[in-house]
Image: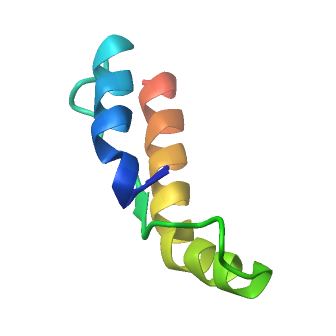
Amino acid sequence: MTTTEFIGAANAQCSALGMAQYQPILVTHPIQPKTEAEVRALADQVIDQIIGKLLKHKEQQAA
């Protein structure tokens, strides 16, 4: 997971780790000035994506 500002760095890291096809989960940038409630709202927006990626990874490991 990363902010939109750092998608290039996230993609480079994925490639360096041999996972060039991986699509990072994105939230809007910046996060730093947001209140706790605003950060929680961002998390609520992407939680289903996070769970989906975790479950997909678990299924792939079990196969």
Q: At which x and y percent is residue 8?
A: 27, 39
Taking depth in this image into account, of 60 and 32 the one nearest to the observer is 32
Taking depth in this image into account, of 16 and 53 the one nearest to the observer is 16
Q: Residue at x 54, y 35 (%)?
A: 58
Taking depth in this image into account, of 63 and 56 the one nearest to the observer is 56
Q: Residue at x 52, y 47 (%)?
A: 55
- Residue extending farthest front: 33
Task: Report which quarter residue 35 is drawn in.
Answer: bottom right
Q: Residue at x 67, y 75 (%)?
A: 39
Task: Report which quarter residue 3 is drawn in.
Answer: bottom left
Position of residue 10 relative to residue 24, above or below, is above
**5 to the left or right of 59:** left
Q: At which x and y percent is residue 25?
A: 41, 55
**10 to the left or right of 59:** left
Position of residue 33 relative to residue 21, above or below, is below
Can I make out residue 44 in this image? Answer: yes
Can I make out residue 18 in this image? Answer: no
Q: At which x and y percent is residue 50?
A: 52, 56
Q: Residue at x 28, y 19 (%)?
A: 15
**20 to the left or right of 45:** left
Q: At which x and y percent is residue 60?
A: 42, 29
Position of residue 56 relative to residue 13, above or below, is below
- Residue extending farthest right: 36
